């Protein structure tokens, strides 16, 4: 890897029997270095960072609950939650600026 440009030169052999790849074409490659089984990933916009802790809002019995979480790795749009959430928790992903703990809420699908 070139530390100045952060690029890698490589050569790969790929089956192109369907003629979908053309000479001079561009390819985007993702190299997975670590994989976490059963990881909890939530949208980055759902996380409320502060100086002392990181929190999210979840729905608990139809009401908003503020939950302190610990975060791990992050991508452009998702954050790995390492502690503080269970896989079946409903995380509030939109309107987090307008909700308050204890407020009644109703879950709606993205398609609504």
Image (tube, rainbow, N blue to C red):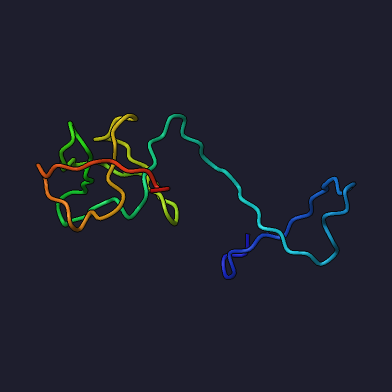
Horizontally, residue 25 falls left or right of residue 83, namely: right
| Residue at far left of view | 102
Q: Residue at x 23, y 41 (%)?
A: 106
In the image shown, does 11 or 48 lie closer to the viewer?
48
Residue at image coords 38%, 48% = 112
Q: Residue 88 sits in which quadrant?
A: top left
Question: Residue 59, image x and y in percent?
Answer: 22, 38
Q: Position of residue 57 (x, y in %)?
A: 21, 45
Compared with 94, 3 (above or below) is: below
- Where residue 21 appears, as percent x and y from the top left, is 82, 57
Up/down of 48 relative to 22, above or below: above
Q: Residue at x 61, y 47 (%)?
A: 31
Quarter that holds the N terminus:
bottom right
Residue at 32% across, 55% down: 45
60 left or right of 87?
Answer: left
Number of marks: 0
Q: Please determine whether, in this image, residue 87 is positioned above or below residue 75.
A: above
Residue at the far bottom: name it: 4
11 vs 60: above or below: below
Q: Is residue 75 left or right of residue 45?
A: right
Percent position of residue 15, x then y: 85, 45
């Amino acid at each position: 890897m070139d530390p100045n440009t952060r690029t890698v030169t490589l050569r790969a052999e790929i089956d192109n029997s369907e003629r979908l790849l053309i000479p001079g074409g561009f390819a985007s490659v993702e190299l997975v270095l670590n994989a976490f089984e059963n990881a909890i990933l939530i949208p980055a916009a759902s996380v409320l960072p502060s100086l002392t802790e990181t929190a999210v809002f979840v729905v608990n019995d139809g009401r908003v609950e503020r939950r302190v979480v610990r975060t791990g790795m992050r991508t452009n749009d998702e954050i790995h939650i390492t502690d503080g959430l269970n896989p079946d928790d409903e995380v509030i992903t939109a309107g987090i600026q307008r909700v308050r703990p204890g407020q009644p809420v109703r879950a709606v699908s993205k398609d609504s």
